[in-house]
Image: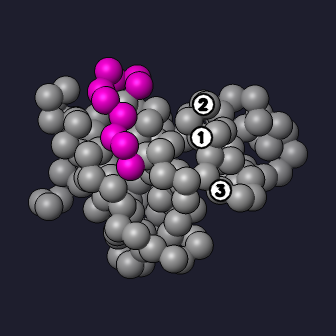
Amino acid sequence: MAAGRWTVAEACQRIAEGHASPWTAVGDFLDAFYRAAQAERAALIADPPPRTRDPDALRWQAFAAAMVEWLAHRYGLERPAWTARPEYVLREPWFLYPEGALRLWSLFSTPPPFKVRNIFCGDRALDRV
């Protein structure tokens, strides 16, 4: 896909293949999603990430599933069925901010789609300011 129009599946593929840092790939997807017209947004989240056995890539795919569920809810889109896959629920908690007060803040402020997947990132992980 042309630069500036990254789907969530492409973002996950870039992460899995090491072509982009996770936050760069997530940011590129979010920029594309937020710039897209409402009618185009569903296409950006429709396709699932490519299957992987790599634990780090799978962790980011779980993040992507939570992100897509949150975006779908917030913007009135149908949640893609792929986001409900059981492999997108992490066995161990993942704190993006594991230290002190930020860890506690993450426990309380993380949106439900992330919490149910055992991901604790706070309520600003998807902000693009």
* 128 on left or right of 5: right
Q: Which mark is residue 90?
A: 3
Q: Is residue 118 above or below residue 40?
A: below
Query: Is 75 situated above or below 86?
Result: above
Q: Which mark is residue 111?
A: 2
| Left or right: residue 72 compared with residue 95 | left
Hey, what amino acid is under mark 3? Leu
Comes first in the chain, label 1 or label 3: 3
Question: Where are the magenta residues, as a range?
Answer: 73-82
- By secondary structure, the bulk of the magenta-drawn segment is best described as loop
Residue in the picture at 12% in, 60% down: 2
Where is residue 67 shown, x and y percent of the image? 46, 42
Is the N terminus in the top left, top right, bottom left or bottom right quadrant? bottom left
* Contact between labelled residues 2 and 3, with CB atoms less than 8 Å apart: no
| Residue 16 picture quarter | bottom left
**Gap in Å between the C-alphas at discs 3 and 2?**
16 Å
Marks 1 and 2, how far apart at CA: 6 Å
Tell me if mark 1 has few (under 14), some (14-19) or many (20+) residues whose alpha carbon lies within 10 angstroms of its own.
many
Density class for disc 3 (Cα within 10 Å; few <14, some 14-19, many ≥20) is: some
Task: Find disc 1 in the rendering and name its residue.
Answer: 114
